[in-house]
Structures are given as structure tokens and as C-alpha cells.
Image (cartoon, grey):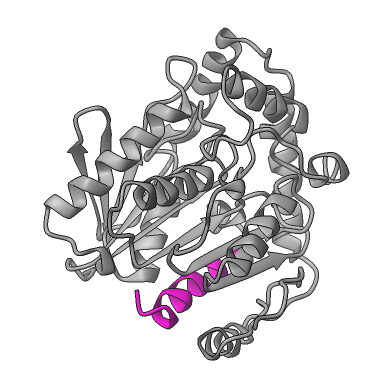
Amino acid sequence: MTASIRPVPVRPVATTAAERRIARALALEPGGPPSLQARVTGQVIRMVVKSVWQRTPDTDAGLARFQRVTELMSAVQRVPRGVAITPQDLGTCTAEWVRAGAPDQRKVFLQMHGGGYFFGGPRLYRGFNWRLSAATGRPVLALDYRLAPQHHPADALHDALTAYDFLRARGYAPEDIVVGGDSAGGHLTLALLLALKERGTALPAAAIVLSPWADLLCESDSHRLNRRSEVLVPAERIAWLGRHFSRGRRHDDPLLSPRNGDLAGLPPLMLTASSTEILRDETLDVAERARAAGVRVLYQEWEGLAHVFPMFAEFMPEGKAAFRHMAEFLRAARA
């Protein structure tokens, strides 16, 4: 029998021997209030990103305009010497391989970016992905799935399934594949796991899910309670997106809300959230529901940080520490 998960700063709830090993390793990273760098970074994000997103009209034209803003952010992404980036055609979409140092080519991390299903991509995430490759010691296949307004999250799920099948066809065994994503990419990661399970495909070794938008209907209390403390995502804008994507679909559809899906049998999950973000409650809810279904779960809640703070590792120590935690989780999960 396992104890229920409760929110704690940084340190995970550990109830099994494997989880206690992770907890001992992660105890080297102290909890507590956010660093000065994290607080300053959060305020910059609020002024630059959230304020622009808040003024973006809830229309297809508005989405396209915000996409162009994020493309400018992508253009200034830099990676250090020794990081190799290689394009990959997957048919319905593209991806890029990111290899930092000399990764173990027998293993792979399939990464799905965030961005509300309407912006973002591998170029914007190059800083994240090279750190992920370096920390986990494996190549990262960063998926450039199809986006709104031209496409629906169902198309993104099709692309994720295509990418997983591509890796299997390339010779990667399920036990050598890890999948992960943040925000909308976290939603896509969970939807991918449920879709693989439904069709009877062997599941990957583990999944790392950062602040997943696990309920497109946005019904969690933190959407209301943390709307002011959230520094990146405007609650009203993401709620409109959720209504837009859910039109004509049953509200219990796992594609809309994978937290309501049958989570039994999923591989070990690492879930991370910030105490002050609007997606905090649904991240915790996925962790609790997965653990109740018998899944090995590591849940971390960091105090007062930005949504998907590892994206800003260049500017804050907590972001750099998060990648060490991901690597330790995979070692403990033997993934």
C-alpha cells in the first residue's frame, strides 16, 4: 500500500525502495524559496511573454501573430560547441536530433515541446534539448508536431505515434526509449502513452512530464487560484484554447483530459510543477491518479518558480538542477 502524494517543495514523496533511492539523491538539492535569479527571471517572463499573450486576440489570426513573436525568440537560440543538430523527416511532420557530447546511441529520448498546441518547436527548445541530452546521456529526438490553427491536438497525437513507431523501426527497443514533454507537450506525452496502451504497443521505459496541461477543459482550482501568481501563461487565454480544441468532443475523451484516462500499466512517471502556476493542480492530480493505479510516480513541486522553469536553466540555478533530477530519476528507473 502506498501513501497519497502531497505537494512538497522540491523533494519528492517516496514510498517504495526505488523512490527512496531517488529521494536520497535529490536531497542534495535543497528546497525552500526561489533564488534571486529565479525571481528576476519570473518578472521578466511576466513582462515579456505573459503580457504579450494576454493581449493576443482569441482568433486564428491572433494565434498566428503570437507564433511570429515566438519565432523571433527561436532565432536567438544558441547551443554550445560540441552539440550536434540533425534534421529528421517523419512524413506528416519533421523532427530534429539533438546530441550533446557523446551520448549512448542505444538509448533515446522522444521530446515533445510545449506551447499551447499553437506555438513552439525544436528550434525554440534547443537550449532545453541539449541540456536534456547532456544530462541523460542519450540523443534527443525533438518532435516538430503539427500546430493550430491549421491543425488539432489529434493531429499532434498522430505525429507522436508516428515518431514512436519510427524509433521502433530504427531499432530502438521499448526499454531504451524515454518519452517526455512540458505543458501541451506534457499533455501530448500522456495522450501518447494512453494511445500506445490502447493499441497494445509496448510502452517506453519511462516518461518525464513537466507541468502538463493534462485537462484541456481547464477545470482545476489552480487555474483560478494561481491566475495572478502564474508568470507565463494567462489563464483566460489557455481556457479559450481549451474550449476551442474541445468543440464537438466528449468531455471524458482522454485526448482532452488524459488525467481522466486509465493510467494503470503506464511506465514510471516523473511529474514536476511549480506551486504558483495554473497547471499545478492537474499535475498533482495525474500523479495521485497514476499512483492509485499502481504506477511508480515521482512528483516534485518547486516553490514559486515559472511554468516549465527548466526552459530557463541559463538564467536560474533551479533550472540546471532540474536536469540533474531528471537524470537521477532515469537511473533509478533503470531507463
Q: Position of residue 314 (x, y in %)?
A: 53, 57
- Tell me, yes or no, if residue 314 can be seen here: no
255 vs 78, nearest the viewer: 255
| Residue 181 as seen in the image, left or right of residue 9 | left
- The quadrant of the rendering that contains the C terminus is bottom left
Within the image, what quadrant is residue 284 found in? bottom right
Q: Which residues are magenta?
A: 319-335
Q: Position of residue 260 (x, y in %)?
A: 61, 47
Magenta stretch prevailing secondary structure = helix
**With respect to residue 298, does 100 lie above or below?**
above
* Membership of 27 in magenta stretch: no
Q: Position of residue 145 (x, y in %)?
A: 36, 33
Q: Position of residue 194 (x, y in %)?
A: 44, 49
* Membership of 334 in magenta stretch: yes
Within the image, what quadrant is residue 81 found in? bottom left
Residue in the image at 50% along x and 28% along y: 119
Residue in the image at 46% along x and 69% along y: 268
Residue in the image at 33% along x and 60% along y: 203
86 vs 215, nearest the viewer: 215
- The quadrant of the rendering that contains the N terminus is bottom right
Residue in the image at 58% along x and 72% along y: 298
